[in-house]
């Protein structure tokens, strides 16, 4: 059957995903959830939606790789035969007075298969929408994703964005939204530096998007707001604790206050190295051959007191 037999049931652009529980996306760090927790083997239309609908996102204090929006779409087959087509979602930016689509921000699903299933009579009610079927029920596919602050997606110099959904070449729907108050620094700086600036630990990794092998953009790490104590130690000191269970990086602010970062993650793959390497600290490169789980996303990496590799990035927005 034809692509025209497909019907768009949902196309939502909000802040949280609800599917087998609620998953906040807005203000979280890059790809905050395992897909297995969000896409189970079975699901119902009533239990699939997003929370906090909005078309305007305030990104005050957001850093690179903080998530901004979540979107979901669900497409059903209204015919009595199967339909196979390509589904494409385009992410557009309105810059220099015209819409443009970054090459790295198009989502494409090849040969999606929408079939018809024979069942008993059923009625589906959702808000002001009612779908009734007799001896048959439609089969639908759905997808949920999120978008984040990044130099090829949500950019500090672009405020208007759009998502467009197509089945083959047939236009289905679009959503537009605005973003405000993104102010992270995009001035290229000499890469490889880490230092304390006032109350924050900052670092400059080698950044793929700075278009240079020796420069990067400054990243500001969110600190643990529940930890601080006054000290007479020298400002700007940075250290890793002598504790196998303490997964933080500590430092002294310019006001002689000891703070620490939020808890770091195990480096992927998790590995133990020689004890002589403990407290060694470095930054991941930004290349497609990086050994990190996600290339070109840069971390502070270090070896803890126990000899295990850990990693840290800017973290969630408080």
Image (spheres, rainbow, N blue to C red):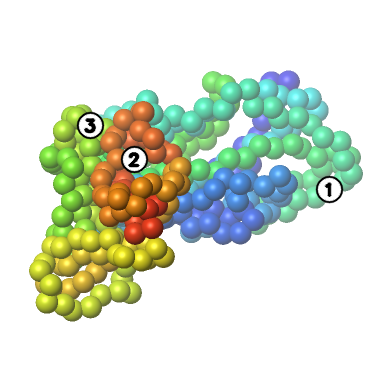
Q: Residue at x 36, y 48 (%)?
A: 274
Please state if 234 lies on the left or on the right of 262 as rendered: left
Vertical side of 4 occupied by 120: above or below: below
Q: CA distance from mark 1 to mark 3?
A: 50 Å
Residue indicated by mark 3: 96
Count of numbered badges drawn on the protein: 3
Vertical side of 81 occupied by 13: above or below: below
Please identify the quarter of the rendering in which residue 215 is found.
top left
Name the mark nearer the viewer: 2 or 3.
2
- Give the percent coordinates (x, y) of residue 205: 23, 42
Please identify the quarter of the rendering in which residue 189 is found.
top left
Mark 1 closeness class: few <14, some 14–19, many ≥20 residues within 10 Å: few
Residue indicated by mark 1: 122
Secondary element type, mark 1 = strand
Mark 2 closeness class: few <14, some 14–19, many ≥20 residues within 10 Å: many
Please identify the quadrant where the N terminus is shown.
top right
Q: Nearer the viewer, residue 104 or 259?
A: 259
Residue 232 marker: none
Please identify the quarter of the rendering in which residue 199 is found.
bottom left
- Give the percent coordinates (x, y) of residue 81: 79, 25
Q: Nearer the viewer, residue 241 or 13?
A: 241
- Give the percent coordinates (x, y) of residue 48: 63, 51
Q: CA distance from mark 2 to mark 3?
A: 27 Å
Please identify the quadrant where the C terminus is shown.
bottom left
Residue indicated by mark 2: 297
Choose the circle earlier in sequence order: 1 or 2: 1
Choose the circle earlier in sequence order: 1 or 3: 3
Secondary element type, mark 2 = loop
Q: Is residue 37 visible?
A: yes
Residue at the farthest bottom position: 230
Q: Residue at x 20, y 45 (%)?
A: 204
Mark 3 closeness class: few <14, some 14–19, many ≥20 residues within 10 Å: few
């Amino acid at each position: 059957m034809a692509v025209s037999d497909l019907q768009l049931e949902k196309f939502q652009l909000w802040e949280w995903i609800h599917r087998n529980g609620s998953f906040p996306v807005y203000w979280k760090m890059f790809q905050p959830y395992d897909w297995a927790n969000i896409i189970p083997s079975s699901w119902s239309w009533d239990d699939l939606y997003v929370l906090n609908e909005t078309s305007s996102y305030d990104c005050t204090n957001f850093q690179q790789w903080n998530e901004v929006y979540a979107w979901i779409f669900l497409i059903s087959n209204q015919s009595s035969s199967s339909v196979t087509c390509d589904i494409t979602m385009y992410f557009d930016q309105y810059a220099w007075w015209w819409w443009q689509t970054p090459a790295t921000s198009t989502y494409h699903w090849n040969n999606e298969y929408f079939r018809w299933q024979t069942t008993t009579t059923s009625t589906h009610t959702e808000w002001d929408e009612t779908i009734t079927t007799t001896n048959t029920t439609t089969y639908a596919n759905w997808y949920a994703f999120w978008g984040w602050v990044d130099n090829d997606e949500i950019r500090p110099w672009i405020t208007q964005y759009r998502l467009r959904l197509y089945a083959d070449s047939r236009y289905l729907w679009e959503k537009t939204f605005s973003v405000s108050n993104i102010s992270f620094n995009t001035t290229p700086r000499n890469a490889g530096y880490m230092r304390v600036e006032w109350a924050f630990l900052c670092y400059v990794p080698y950044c793929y998007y700075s278009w240079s092998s020796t420069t990067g953009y400054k990243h500001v790490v969110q600190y643990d707001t529940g930890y601080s104590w006054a000290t007479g130690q020298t400002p700007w000191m940075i250290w890793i604790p002598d504790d196998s269970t303490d997964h933080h990086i500590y430092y002294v602010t310019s006001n002689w206050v000891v703070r620490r970062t939020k808890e770091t993650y195990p480096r992927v793959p998790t590995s133990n190295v020689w004890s002589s390497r403990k407290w060694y600290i470095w930054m991941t490169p930004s290349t497609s051959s990086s050994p990190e789980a996600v290339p070109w996303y840069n971390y502070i990496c270090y070896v803890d007191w126990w000899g295990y590799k850990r990693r840290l990035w800017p973290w969630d927005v408080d």
